[in-house]
Amino acid sequence: MTSKPNTLYTYLFSICLVYTFVGSWIIPVESARILAIETIAGSSHWNYVSSVLRVLSNNGHHVTVFTPFPDGERTNYTEVNTSNDHGRNFVGMDLIDTLNLWRHPTSMMKFLITERTFMCDKVYKSVELNKIMEEKEKSNFDLLIVETLGYDCELYLADKLNLPLIYLVSSPMVTFAENFISGDMPNPATISHFYADHAVPRTFAQRFSNTLLLGYSVILLSYDKWMKKYTNNRP
């Protein structure tokens, strides 16, 4: 009657011994080397992005960030100041200026088509970033983090560096870019468009206008990318 318990104890001890031996040969997880690019020269956007990067660096990850809003370097945190690379930034904009510039949905779409590409171009002209792209084998980055507004000019950098890409989105959602970011198209009958004047579509009129906004923004961005492919084709 005592042989079975002894056999069980021996079996369990053998398993623990094997796991201990195998575990001693497993290399512990090291901190990641993260490259972060802030392509949007807006202080409110940087408030969000910097809070994410602060948590990462505080938890032992090594963060190198290109930003037009330098905070000062610290442990595990290196900055490259890109404030001079941006021909236009929005540091001095107050609420009234913001409403005047983007009070209408068409104004925001025009901004995405013109200014967004302009911002990406400014970042890609950075001498330091080009050096990283040219010497990507020596950079040893593990991950790329970029804030997006729904225009995929950031994908070039991820492809050039051959790095996994994580998007940061400062708004609750960017409905016209959901398909590009996540592969899913939001239902305009239940989810309000990013530029809608209502939080939840409840009436037929709101759902109808929501559908028009979604169709307008998706078609306009798709058409613009298609035109740029043939008129201003770049990597």
Image: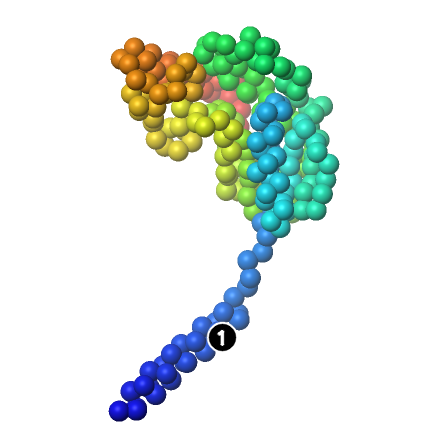
- Residue under label 1: 21
Looking at the rendered image, the quarter that the N terminus falls into is bottom left
Q: In the rendered view, does 97 fall on the left or right side of 152?
A: right
Q: Residue at x 53, y 71 (%)?
A: 24
Q: Residue at x 45, y 28 (%)?
A: 172
* Residue 41 position within the rendered picture, expressed as x and y whole percent measured from the top left: 62, 23
Q: In the rendered view, does 58 fall on the left or right side of 197?
A: right
Tag 1, which secondary structure?
A: helix
Q: Residue at x 27, y 13 (%)?
A: 204
Q: In the rendered view, does 71 fall on the left or right side of 150?
A: right
- Vertical comparison of 209 with 182: above or below: above
* Residue 64 position within the rendered picture, expressed as x and y whole percent measured from the top left: 65, 40
Q: Residue at x 34, y 15 (%)?
A: 210
Nearer the observer, 168 or 39: 168
Asked whether the viewer can see residue 192, the reply is yes
- Vertical comparison of 205 with 194: above or below: above
